[in-house]
Image (cartoon, grey):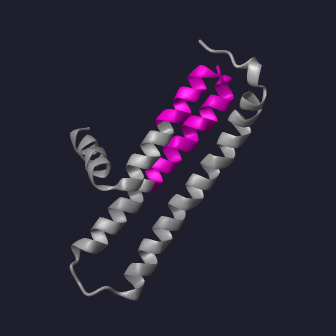
Amino acid sequence: MRFALQGLAFAWRNERNMRIHLCLALAALLLVALLDVPLVQALFVLLSILLVLTGELFNTALEKTIDATGAKPHPLAKAAKDCAAAAVLLCALFAVVVGIAVFGPLILEGPAWRWK
């Protein structure tokens, strides 16, 4: 558990995209609470958040491993980094689709917001 928390702390301190993803995740969770999102939809939001954060952590791990070799940049190393970044992009696009599907109707209702 300690090493896992150290990994999260490292990603928070050193990876701008991780900070962005975490801030957006907190905003999404706040919306889930404020809009009283039904359980199944809230679980989709949570799944999306975890998918993006996990993808970002794997991307960081791969990038740091490649960078640690200290070797002259290789085209395959670039391809590996690009593929890992593409995986995070796909996760983030899925999260956007889930966010639109879950929050869109609730936000468009306007006065029907149920503030707690």
State the image quarter where residue 48 is shown: top right
- Is the C terminus in the top left, top right, bottom left or bottom right quadrant? top right
100 sits to left or right of 4: right
Write down the quadrant of residue 62 in the picture: bottom left
Q: Residue at x 50, y 50 (%)?
A: 52
Q: In the rendered picture of this protein, how many numbered marks are placed on residues?
A: 0
| Residue name at image x 53 percent, y 27 percent | 30
Q: Position of residue 20 (x, y in %)?
A: 43, 48
Q: Is residue 97 left or right of residue 48?
A: right
Left or right: 93 as drawn, with respect to 75: right
Instruction: Provide the residue span drawn in magenta.
Output: 26-55
Image quarter of the N terminus: top left
76 or 107: nearer the viewer: 107
Please tell me whether residue 66 is drawn above or below residue 99 in the rendered image: below
Q: Is residue 71 magenta?
A: no
Question: Whole-percent x and y of residue 94?
Answer: 63, 51
Can you say whether 3 is above or below 60 in the image? Answer: above
Which residue is located at x 29 percent, y 66 percent?
64
Q: Residue 97 or 16: which is nearer the viewer?
A: 16
Give the residue at the far top of this rendering: 116
Question: What percent of the width, then of the height, locates residue 40?
Answer: 67, 29
Residue 66 coordinates in the image, percent (x, y): 30, 73
> What secondary structure characterizes most of the magenta part?
helix
In magenta stretch: residue 43: yes
